[in-house]
Image: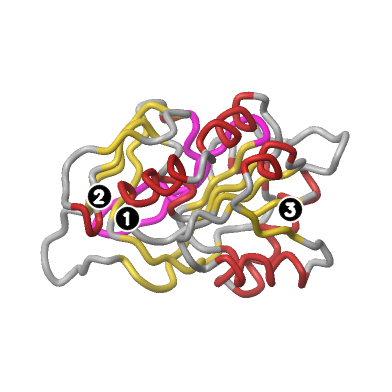
Amino acid sequence: MLTIVDYGSGNLRSVQKAFERLGVPALITDDPGRVGDAERLVLPGVGAFGDAMRELHARGLVEPIVDHLRADRPFLGICMGLQLLFGMGHEGGGHGGGRHPGLGIFAGEVTRFELAPPLKVPHMGWNRVDWCGPGRAWTDAPPAHFYFVHSYVARPVDGSIVAATADHGGPFCAAVARGRLLATQFHPEKSQAAGLALLGGWLAATETGGRARAG
């Protein structure tokens, strides 16, 4: 079963519909047991890092997600679902700023873009994504444009997990990958043909009983 984690972040139905267009039904749930039993897990999300972690803890979802990741079971993170994989985030949302512990799967922090005019924050719209490192194992496609909406960026300590980069006032991490894990800062579900192709590639690479190509 492909399972989409619901922690009140919104944007869930558009992710579900993208997989349905590929012929794959997806369950949206905040039930820790169902998340723990998932064959393939999708962690999407929009909003603030601190708020997202508070909701995951409140709903008892942190432990089953971390267990899934540590077991190297198929995982796709989208936007906030990439950022939450890191050790620390600096976006507090409605509860103020400060530093907020993340899931801690990867060492690194999620910090705000620091850009000079005329560049704007949030980084919103279509931008070219260049695949690199482990990203080349996930897709054979040439560079393509994907849709972004974010004000904060992940800064991994280990550069070998960076699977793609994009540029907004300088290069930044647009995707990470390791083992059966792929996470993107951009939104594949909003990226038309390129996004559907990437989701299809992730599905093909994580077929039950198969092995992911990344890592």
Ranked by sequence position, the earlier of labels 3 and 1 is 1
Instruction: Give the main secondary structure, helix, strand or loop, of the magenta stretch.
Output: strand
Inspect the image, locate mark 1, and give the three-letter code of the amino acid beneath it.
Ala
State which region is magenta: 160-180
With respect to residue 33, does 11 lie above or below?
below
| Disc 3 crowd, CA 10 A, few/some/many (<14, 14-19, 20+) | some
- Residue 40 lies, in percent from the top left, at 72, 44
Magenta span contains residue 171: yes
In the rendered structure, are the residues bearing label 1 and label 2 in contact, judged by CB atoms less than 8 Å apart?
yes
Inspect the image, locate mark 3, and give the three-letter code of the amino acid beneath it.
Gly
Ranked by sequence position, the earlier of labels 1 and 2 is 1
SS category of the residue bearing label 3: helix
- Residue 78 lies, in percent from the top left, at 52, 54
Ranked by sequence position, the earlier of labels 2 and 3 is 2
Spatial separation of the CA atoms under disc 1 and disc 2? 6 Å
Spatial separation of the CA atoms under disc 3 and disc 1? 29 Å
Residue situated furthest right in the rendering: 209
Count of labels in the image: 3
Query: Which residue is denoted by mark 2 in the rendering?
Result: 91
Left or right: residue 113 compared with residue 17: left
For residue 48, the mark is 1
Query: Which residue is denoted by mark 3 in the rendering?
Result: 201
Is 111 in front, or is 102?
102
Spatial separation of the CA atoms under disc 2 and disc 3? 31 Å
- Judged by depth in the image, the label closer to the viewer, 3 or 1, is 1
